[in-house]
Amino acid sequence: MPEVSIITPVYNSSKFLKQTIGCVLNQTFTDFEWLITDDASSDDSVAILRKCKDPRIKLTFSETNGGAGHARNISLSKATGRYITFLDSDDFWEPNFLLEMVQFLKQENAELAYSNYARCEENLTPILADFKADKEVDFHSLLKTCRLSLLSSMYDSRRVGIEYFPNGSKREDHVMWLNLLKKIPTAKPLNKTMAKYRMHSNGISRRKSSIIKDQYLVYRDHMRFNTLKSGFYTAQWALNGFLKYSKFFN
């Protein structure tokens, strides 16, 4: 069995997919499987993927477009690695990402860890200061802001099990991390930049005003909080989101 399982959803990703493939195949840590689920792409993403003959790549197809969380869950159901990490089809890792994350988890005896990541425009030129992994994250702090990013985190499935993404939530990554942190004390920070995140101008994570309701439902429907408590944490999340992405504070 490989030591690491990399989970990647693909949907009409041909513009950046070759660069993402390159960053994975150039990793200095080589004991991994790369589980890719194509979510019914209509461009040439599948053709690009089929040109990769590396036996560590395991390609699965979704018959219908079910969204990134759905595609990730298909791959997660097939994962055999001890350590689980995520890379979307338009993001980028530095060559030592897997090696340093695995070493850090072992050194810290941690179940979950996250690192810094650069916040870039489409050509991977930084446009904001790097997001810093400078605090331990627990369940209560994660309620107020999602400091954990899929592309810069890794967890030990041998110790915490496989954590799937919820159906029916547009904030499925936040719900998944909250559910995982119910099981463990903290996520440990590795304060080193080892990933690059493309901040698309129309990205859902930046349209805070349009997803306030979706975030409220994270607390009400998935965490089962009452209306007052759900409203309180939604307000905290909105404020922290403004500070996270505002150039004035970065």
Image (spheres, helix red, strand yellow):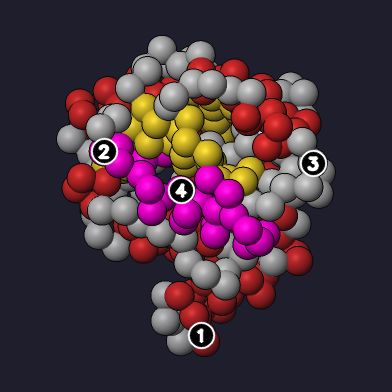
The residue nearer to you, when weighing 138 against 59, is 59
Residue 139 placement, left or right of 212: left
Which residue is at 52% across, 87% downward?
227
Q: Residue at x 53, y 45 (%)?
A: 60
Please state, as top left, top right, bottom left or bottom right, where the C terminus lies in the image. Answer: top right
Identify residue for label 2: 82
When the figure is inspected, residue 56 is found, relative to residue 181, above or below; the finding is: above
**Residue pointed to by mark 1:** 228
Query: Residues in magenta?
Result: 60-86
Q: In this view of the protein, which residue sits in the foreground, 129 or 15?
A: 15
Provide residue 67's location: percent of width, then percent of height. 63, 58
The three-letter amino acid code for the residue at tag 4 is Ser
Is residue 81 covered in magenta? yes
Is label 3 or label 2 in front? 3
**Dots 1 and 2: beta carbons under 8 Å?**
no
Residue annotated with mark 3:
43
Q: Look at the numbered disc 2 and give the secondary structure of its residue.
A: loop
Q: Quadrant of the N terminus?
A: top left
Badge 1 density bin: few <14, some 14–19, many ≥20, Cα 10 Å: few
The circle on residue 75 is 4
**Horizontal and vertical percent position of residue 139:** 35, 59
**Closer to the eye: label 2 or 4:** 4
Q: Nearer the viewer, mark 3 or mark 1?
A: 3
